[in-house]
Every structure is written in structure tokens, then in C-alpha cells.
Image (cartoon, rainbow, N blue to C red):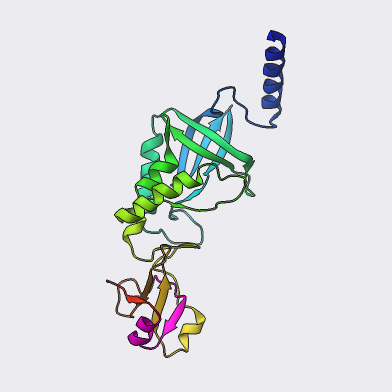
Amino acid sequence: MLKTKMLVSVISALLLISGCSYLTSNDEKRIPVKVEKVIDGDTIKVRVDGKLETVRFLLVDTPESVHPSKPVQPFSKEASTYTLDMLEGADVQLELGIGERDKYGRLLAYVYADGQSVQENLLKKGLARVAYVFEPNTKYVDQYERIQKQAQKDSVGIWSIENYVQEEGYVSDDVEQPEQAINKECKIKGNISSSGDKIYHLESGRYYKMTKPEKWFCTEKEAMDSGFRKSKQ
């Protein structure tokens, strides 16, 4: 039995040195890392076994603050600051996803600071949405979605802006009007939110420019007849 344990230890050490995979001996399979930089709310740089790695948080997406082709989005700075505050001076560990890396070479991981899940805390504060849910990395998705539903109910963070969170991501102020709207007389935007609410927006509305329409209406009556309600702002 002792010889078997020694053999496993030797094999694990050799695999680690060769760079085949990051392995740990603890039950939770978390590896300790040193945080070098917080890039934004869901991406960090860490040093693990002396190697600098970029880590993308699994199953969550925060608004963009450093995207090369997107402006700074609402609550992106808050998300980055919150992640920094959680990780700074903390005992940080990673639980790597299955497959470990995405197409950009980034490590995919669940991140923990002093034993607390960074992903869960971002969701609780309304600073992230559940996203990029792909098999086989769905271990905590049900748990995360429960936390997200509560944040939506409480209208905190990203959920405090009507229609800001869409299936495809976050809709910012800079979103241009679709080509089809330029030559249309019907200017009322109909949008279906992530929670299923059907809302229509007038040009005078606060969120008109940032709203990506699923449908266009010529009159408010037409919108209401289709089951849409008027935006509160």
C-alpha cells in the first residue's frame, strides 16, 4: 500500500514538472496560486508553480472594462474592483475545469479567496451573469443560477438596469441602431428581457438607445396588443 502511494506521488510530480497538467493531492482538487493582476471582473493573471497564467472564471461573465472593441460598460469597474478586493491579500486557490484551457490558452477555473467562491460572490452582488455554459464544465451551474435569480429579484447591480442583460451579453449605450430601423417608420422597440418580460421602448425613453429590439412597432397599441408593456423609464 505504501509503495503504491509513493508511486502515485512520483507520477504526479513528473506530470506537473512536464507541464501536462496541474495536479493537486487534496480532496477538493484546488491549487494555490499567487495573483499577479486583475484584468477585469472575470479574468486574472496568476503565478502557479512559477509560471504566469491567465485565468478565465468559469460559468460567469462580467461587463467589459478592457475589451479592445467595446466601451467601458456599466458595472464593469465595480466588478473589477470587487474581484480585486476579494483576492488582494487572500489565500487564493483554483479548481480547474475539465479540459483546463479555452481556445485562447487561458486556464478555465473556479476561483476561491480564503475559501469563498469569487464567482458566487460576483453573482450575489449583481456584478456578473451566468454565461458560457458548455459541457462538461457545468459543475456549479445550478447553484450559480439560483444565486442569479435572487440577484435579479433584488434588482442589484446589472439587474438594476432594465434590459441591460441580454442573452448575447450586455447592451451598452453605444449600440447602433440596426440597419432595418433606419428606413422604417415604426420606431417603437420591442424587447424580451432575460427574465421573459416583454417591454416596449419609445424614442424618448431612457433605455431606448441601448435596447436591442426583437420586434418593431408603429404604435403603442400595436405593442400592447402583442403582449408588451411600456418601459418604466
Based on the picture, tell me whether residue 223 belongs to the magenta stretch.
Answer: yes
Question: Residue 38: image x %, image y %?
Answer: 45, 41
Q: Nearer the viewer, residue 160 or 20?
A: 160
Query: Eyeballing the image, is 152 above or below 182?
Result: above
Based on the picture, tell me whether residue 152 belongs to the magenta stretch.
Answer: no
Q: Which image quarter: residue 210?
A: bottom left
Residue drawn at (51%, 29%) of the image: 33
Quarter in which the N terminus is drawn: top right
Residue 40 shows up from this direction: no
Residue 109 shows up from this direction: yes
Q: Which image quarter: residue 191?
A: bottom left
Question: Residue 92: image x %, image y %?
Answer: 46, 30
Question: Residue 32: image x %, image y %?
Answer: 51, 27
- Name the outermost residue toward the top: 2
Q: How many discs mark residues in the rendered view?
A: 0
Residue drawn at (42%, 30%) of the image: 115
Query: Eyeballing the image, is 202 above or below 50?
Result: below
Left or right: 181, with 25 as reference point? left
Residue drawn at (68%, 25%) of the image: 17
Quarter in which the C terminus is drawn: bottom left
Q: Nearer the viewer, residue 45 or 102?
A: 102
Question: Residue 44: image x %, image y %?
Answer: 49, 41
Left or right: 220, with 144 as reference point? left
Magenta extent: 210-226
